[in-house]
Image (cartoon, rainbow, N blue to C red):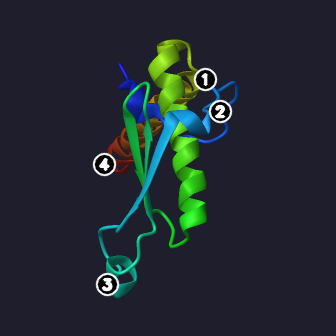
């Protein structure tokens, strides 16, 4: 089972719930992590809270405040959609599909490895 809010952050989802600016509380804070003076002296990290659901998103992916605001809104919109729709959300379905593909790829790789192993064993037996 996939934790619902961890599925957010994937692009290409459609039919998301719309957010109104009245439901959002926005703050600009100093970011953290590597970057030295560029990070420590600028308030370009965006903290966005959806008041009805209480979901908070913190975005500090770029140095630009405007880009961080846009990214934070996209991520928050996906998380709110997951919060209200649950397993019926497009974001959740997309995450499940990608996990299924990943498992299938892993299974095929394991089969190929076993096949190669058997082939080498057969070659060793033929040489003897």
Residue denoted by label 1:
90
Residue at 52%, 15% in the rendered image: 85
Q: Earlier in the sequence, mark 3 or mark 2?
A: 2
- The reply to whether the C-beta atoms of the residues labelled 1 and 2 are less than 8 Å apart is yes
**Separation (CA) of disc 1 from disc 2:** 6 Å
Q: Secondary structure at mark 2?
A: loop
Q: Earlier in the sequence, mark 1 or mark 3?
A: 3
Res 121 label? none
Q: Secondary structure at mark 3?
A: loop
Q: In front: mark 4 or mark 1?
A: 1
Q: Earlier in the sequence, mark 2 or mark 4?
A: 2
**Separation (CA) of disc 4 from disc 3:** 64 Å
Q: Is residue 108 visible?
A: no
Residue at 48%, 36% in the rendered image: 8
* Image location (x, y in percent) of residue 93: 56, 21
Circle 1 crowding by C-alpha within 10 Å: few under 14, some 14–19, many from 20: some
**Separation (CA) of disc 1 from disc 3:** 39 Å
Give residue 64's quadrant in the image: bottom right
Residue denoted by label 3:
36
Q: For the N terminus, give its image quadrant.
A: top left
**Separation (CA) of disc 4 from disc 1:** 58 Å
- The reply to whether the C-beta atoms of the residues labelled 3 and 2 are less than 8 Å apart is no
* Image location (x, y in percent) of residue 118: 38, 37
Q: Earlier in the sequence, mark 4 or mark 1?
A: 1
Give residue 7's quadrant in the image: top left
């Amino acid at each position: 089972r996939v934790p619902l809010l961890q599925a957010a952050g994937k692009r290409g989802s459609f039919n998301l719930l719309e957010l109104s600016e009245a439901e959002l509380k926005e703050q600009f804070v100093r970011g953290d992590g590597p970057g030295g003076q560029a990070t420590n002296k600028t308030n370009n990290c965006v903290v966005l809270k959806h008041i009805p659901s209480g979901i908070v998103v913190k975005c500090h992916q770029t140095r630009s405040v405007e880009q961080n605001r846009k990214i934070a809104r996209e991520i928050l919109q996906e998380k709110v959609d997951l919060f209200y729709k649950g397993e019926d959300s497009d974001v959740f379905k997309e995450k499940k599909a990608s996990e299924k593909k990943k498992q299938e790829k892993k299974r095929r790789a394991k089969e190929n490895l076993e096949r190669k192993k058997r082939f080498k064993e057969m070659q060793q037996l033929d040489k003897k």
